[in-house]
Amino acid sequence: GENVEQHPSTLSVQEGDSAVIKCTYSDSASNYFPWYKQELGKGPQLIIDIRSNVGEKKDQRIAVTLNKTAKHFSLHITETQPEDSAVYFCAARGPSQFYFGTGTSLTVIP
Amino acid sequence: DARVTQTPRHKVTEMGQEVTMRCQPILGHNTVFWYRQTMMQGLELLAYFRNRAPLDDSGMPKDRFSAEMPDATLATLKIQPSEPRDSAVYFCASGTRTGARELFFGEGSRLTVL
């Protein structure tokens, strides 16, 4: 089955700096890659996604890039704010289910 | 505001007791997933259903865990007997079909087994 690896597991940045989280996947048949944000005590919520026929997608301060050849995709958060502090999960959609990375705990230091 | 509802939000029980967690998926969603979240394992898929039929429960310890969908508005995850290693947060998520574009997660049920 699919295997999704995510790095780093923890990330601290100064407010206003950028944060980058990287994921790799193993199954070339995976065609949809969502990113979820999980705040303390809450369930994960979708923040951005990308399909395999697109290389990059942006939504305000958040962007995701996908390199199908190398089988990796990344989340970029610019001008980070304290409210960006959370755990972020990448995922890849296989034929019948989603495969999640192990999560990145992002701390934005005011 | 459509959302996935999970009960209980918190449960503390003693080893050996039966635990039942419930999930109400978003109305109209026909795919339901159960995940377990621990610090060590991240999000583990336990089971999922489409149109109330179990499609895959290979991630679930069969001897003590069971998952069902008695009707389209209720999914249950039962642990009997519970063990301390079952302590985790259990999430239910629903979508519109298998491999749906977006999963909507509930707030989770935090289980502590003493």
Image: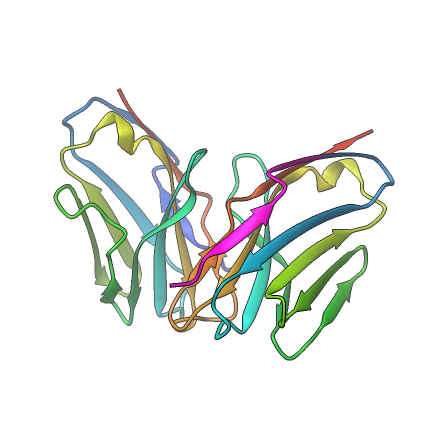
Q: Which colour scheme is used?
A: rainbow
Q: Does the magenta stretch include residue A3?
A: yes
- At x 34%, y 37%, the residue is B8
Identify the residue at horizontal 25%, vertical 47% (top origin): B77
Horizontal side, residue A30 vs residue B78: left or right: right
- Residue B105 lies in magenta, yes or no? no
Pick the residue in front: B33 or B6.
B33
- Closer to the camera in the image, B74 or A71: A71
Q: Residue furthest front?
A: A70
Q: Residue at x 41, y 50 (%)?
A: B5
Taking the image as drawn, is residue B26 in sight?
A: no
Q: Residue at x 80, y 40 (%)?
A: A81
Q: In the rendered image of this protein, does residue A53 appear above or below residue B42?
A: below
Relative horizontal placement of residue B50, taking residue B67 as reference (left or right): right
Residue A3, position in %: x, y? 45, 57
Range drawn in magenta = A1-11
